[in-house]
Amino acid sequence: MILIALILGLSAGLSPGPLLTLVVTETLRYGLGAGIKTALAPLITDLPIILLSLFVLTRFASSPGILGILSLCGAIVVFSIGLQTVRKPTPEEVNKANPGLPIVKGSVVNLLNPHPYLFWFTVGGPLVVEASKSGKAVVVGFFVVFYTCLVGSKVLLALSVYKTRGLFMRRNLYSIVVRLLGCVLCILGIVLFIDGIRSLKGATNLF
């Protein structure tokens, strides 16, 4: 479970998307501090999303059939994100950034981004529900590892962008790393899909 949290956290942190693009933009325009503050946005915006997803999912914790269906949906989401990451490993350039508080802009972007909602309702939420069966320590470990990797990777990216100024790291190296993470996500999607099938079979055997 901790390994899954590490893979998902790194992949979410480095995959191209609105927040990653904003981290790069804020760093280039306003400095390292602005980039780091933008990278911290998930720590603020994800809490209500997580609580809502867990509130809904715990109502179905005793139903392996529903959790199996959600696992299948999550597997498809993870696999599609991985495939998209392999095909397009670098974020699009953003030429303009509105002035203002970086962490506020990052929070707004993350709240309007559908990926956190999809992730926690179809992937993260079911994983947390499953982890809770092994004890609170596993759940806490999952969150700590996931958000350390997610936020930490964005902070390191901001630092790299700041150090290299306008070069935005070595694009070839960045593309290779992100493509590898995309491949790992595709594999993880297949694993989650198999787990979903097993849950559905288990639910079928109950009748």
Image: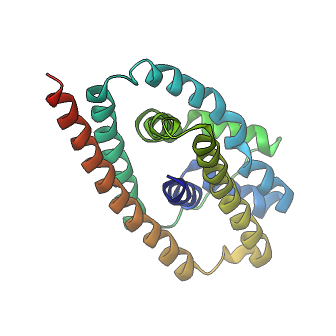
The percent position of residue 176, horizontal first and vertical second, equals 48, 78
The percent position of residue 137, horizontal first and vertical second, equals 63, 43
Vertical arrangement, residue 165 with respect to residue 70, above or below: below
Give whichever of 13, 28 is nearer the camera. 13
Q: Is residue 203 left or right of residue 73?
A: left
Number of marks present in the image shown: 0
Q: Is residue 132 left or right of residue 159?
A: left
Residue 90 at least partly seen: yes
Color style of the picture: rainbow
Vertical arrangement, residue 84 with respect to residue 206, above or below: below
Residue found at x 21% / y 29%: 203
Residue found at x 26% / y 37%: 199
Vertical arrangement, residue 50 with respect to residue 186, above or below: above
The percent position of residue 65, horizontal first and vertical second, equals 26, 28
Q: Is residue 193 left or right of residue 102?
A: left
For residue 183, which quarter of the picture? bottom left
Give whichever of 80, 17 is nearer the camera. 80
Residue found at x 79% / y 76%: 163
The percent position of residue 80, horizontal first and vertical second, equals 34, 52
Residue found at x 86% / y 57%: 33
* Quadrant that contains the C terminus: top left
Give whichever of 156, 55 is nearer the camera. 55
Give whichever of 129, 48 is nearer the camera. 129
For residue 206, which quarter of the picture? top left
Residue 99 at least partly seen: no
For residue 102, which quarter of the picture? top right
